[in-house]
Amino acid sequence: MKISSVKGFHDVLPAESARWAEIEATARDIFDRYNFSEIRLPIVERAELFRRSVGETTDIVEKEMYAFEDRDGTVLTLRPEGTASAVRAYVEHAMQTQEPVTKLSYFGPMFRRERPQRGRLRQFSQIGAEVFGRDDPAIDAEILLLLSDLLQAIGIESAEIGVNTLGCSDCRPAFREALVAWGESHRDQLCADCQRRLQQNPLRLLDCKQPQCVALRDGAPRMIEHCDPACGEHFARVRQLCEEQGLELVLQPYMVRGLDYYCRTAFEVVASGLGSQNAVGGGGRYDGLVKSLGGPQVGGIGFALGVERLALVLEAQGGDAPRPAPEFYIAPLGAAGESAAFALGHRLRAEGARVEVDSGGKSLKSQMRRAGKMEAPYVILLGEDEVGSGRITVRDMQARADRRGVAALDTDINELRAALSAAATAEG
RNA sequence: GUGAGUGUAGCUCAAUCGGUUAGAGCGCCGGACUGUGGCUCCGGAGGUUGUGGGUUCGAUUCCCAUCACUCACCCCA
């Protein structure tokens, strides 16, 4: 009986993984430019970590975490997100004592037990970044610029960054009360979900998509108008700094986020081509989180991007996934050719070339066909003639020409490349 | 978690009202060319019709269950 993968857990096959590699390489480059350093975090954490950071009543913690008891009774969980782990590591290693500002990036799988859909998997991969030790508007703007640069470098054309301020622990309670009061006064016009939200998580009233609630929303209080002066000035400055650098942010006064730790600047990246799962990333400021997990009172801000969703957007844009081709395809003919091919292949690889060595038993025709399919620019033929003379024949696939005896069998890679380009030039 | 749709070859899809040997294109392998790819032509392999049950003389087709995927809700990356 065949064994299949688990629901919501997918293989990323070579055709797709090349795109992933490109996305990740691009991210590393951009993170370097902003002077972020990678942190590699464990996939398993204590369940408590997420209950205390993400929030006891959030959907993620309430119904989406994979949790299990270890043999010694510890309740472990497959991490549903990366920020909590990064904060835990920051606190655990007392990183604030090493440097005033810590800038971390991370890559890796996250796990949430949701109903799978296109762009929504139970194991999905994130690219994330976090900054600890700064709470000024400039670092928020730096993060937003980094995010924007990253999206652009990856090639996401339709990305739009929506921003809002969520206020802080001083001004949010008052806003919350205003919102509840407003909600109560319109209770009978709200959808059933929102009537429930009114009790449990009133901020969520704002991003309901039900038509009746959307229509009602224009009269709802906005955080941007209810937050205290410090939060308001902070947010205005963040937007100004971004605008000065040519980054357009879309103010979304009703945006809220699904994780409890966010405050002040919050943002979401949406892109087209994903259907209803159109968020490719999101993040925000979380000034109380480090302290609440036992660390110093330092501010933090970060974001995460979903790799699967980025790949889907690129696919929807029609871009081809990269398909790396070997530089040399070595086609042996017969037993003598095979052992020469094996040795030559090993040497060229040691010298840095990408090389595919076929086995000797196959017809030249089928080897040529395979080389053509792989888009190898050169096929090295090794049969009786070549082994006997000690000179190799190279088929220049693009020129459709054979270079007989173009190099010695014991050539090195530089000689070989030079001989091939000389042969091509001589031909005109 | 809720509601709905779809499951046929590796992939994309056919198959009349329930009818006897389930087809095509692409891909794969081989040949036309005994040492030469892409184009063309020819041939071949590949299927428990998602799985399990039921109805029927007979099920890819109808019914039930189950699993997976997809869409919307929800949520978020």
Image (cartoon, coloured by chain):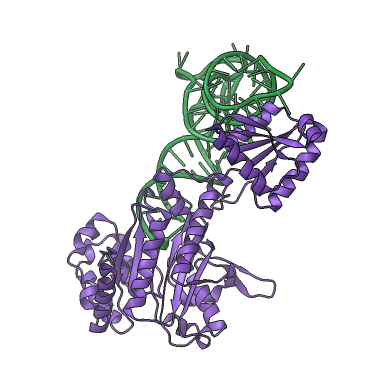
Chain colours: A purple, B green
Query: Could you say which quadrant of the image residue A366 lies in?
Result: top right
Residue A196 image point, x, y percent: 33, 66
> Vertical placement of A193 versus A352: above or below?
below
> A426 or A369, which lies in front?
A426
Report the side of A383 relative to A113 (left or right). right
Query: Could you say which quadrant of the image residue A224 lies in?
Result: bottom left
Please identify the residue farthest to the front as the structure is shown: A426
> A224 or A324, which lies in front?
A324
Q: Quick check: can you spot residue A147?
A: yes
Residue B43 image point, x, y percent: 65, 15
Please identify the residue farthest to the left as the structure is shown: A219
> A51 or A242, which lies in front?
A242
> Vertical placement of A121 versus A366: above or below?
below
Report the side of A330 relative to A24 (left or right). right
Number of on-image labels: 0
Q: Residue at (22%, 57%) from the top-left corner?
A: A212
Residue A218 image point, x, y percent: 18, 64
The quarter of the rendered structure image containing the N terminus of chain A is top right
> Vertical placement of A233 versus A400: above or below?
below
Residue A405 image point, x, y percent: 70, 34
Q: Quick check: can you spot residue A376?
A: no
Report the side of A84 relative to A256 (left or right). right
> A72 or A82, which lies in front?
A82
Q: Residue at (24%, 80%) from the top-left corner?
A: A233
